[in-house]
Amino acid sequence: MITFDEFKKAEIKIGTILSAEKVPDADKLIKLMINLGEETPRQILSGIALHYTDPSVLVGKQVPVLANLPTRTIRGFESQGMVLYAVGEGFLTTVEPGREVPPGTPVQ
């Protein structure tokens, strides 16, 4: 359990995926470039390659991003946030707004 005040610290924003490609020599990683309404797109690595064998299907999707995580280096690449997915037994899928919204729109 977390408190409401702890939850409020999470900065979740809608981002638009601009590009998606597999990370060389990594079975599970996809490198995403995501527009969060900032000056520069964010690079985010996501361990979803087993669920998206053709990463290009992700381009154009709008997804929630946990934007205030510290940058991590994974396999030599910086990851500047975390995309949130719906995950269940045997599936993983993007979670998308019901209509297109401006990149950077906060999720509350």
Image: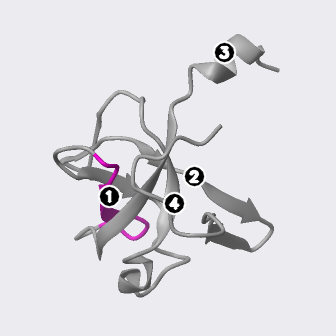
Q: In front: 40, or 78?
A: 40
Q: In front: 3, or 89?
A: 3
Q: Which residue is mark 4?
A: 63
Q: Secondary structure at mark 2?
A: loop
Residue 32 is inside the magenta segment? yes
Give the magenta range.
26-37
Q: CA distance from mark 4 to mark 3?
A: 22 Å
Residue type beneath disc 1: Ile
Marks 4 & 3, CB-CB < 8 Å contact: no
Q: Secondary structure at mark 4?
A: strand
Residue 2 is inside the magenta segment? no
Q: Secondary structure at mark 3?
A: helix
Q: Which residue is mark 2?
A: 84
Which is nearer the N-term, disc 1 or disc 2?
1
Binning the other alpha carbons within 10 Å of mark 4 as few (below 14), some (14 to 19) or many (20 upward) gives: many
Q: Check residue 44 in the rendering and tell me which mark sits there, or answer none.
A: none
Q: Quarter-wise, where is residue 54 in the image?
A: bottom left
Binning the other alpha carbons within 10 Å of mark 3 as few (below 14), some (14 to 19) or many (20 upward) gives: few
Q: In front: 4, or 25?
A: 4
Marks 1 & 4, CB-CB < 8 Å contact: yes
Q: Quick check: 101 left or right of 93?
A: left
Q: Residue at x 62, y 63 (%)?
A: 97
Q: CA distance from mark 3 to mark 1?
A: 26 Å
Q: Which residue is mark 3?
A: 6
Binning the other alpha carbons within 10 Å of mark 2 as few (below 14), some (14 to 19) or many (20 upward) gives: some
Residue type beneath disc 4: Val
Q: Residue at x 52, y 76 (%)?
A: 50
Q: Which residue is mark 1?
A: 34
Residue type beneath disc 2: Leu
Marks 2 & 3, CB-CB < 8 Å contact: no
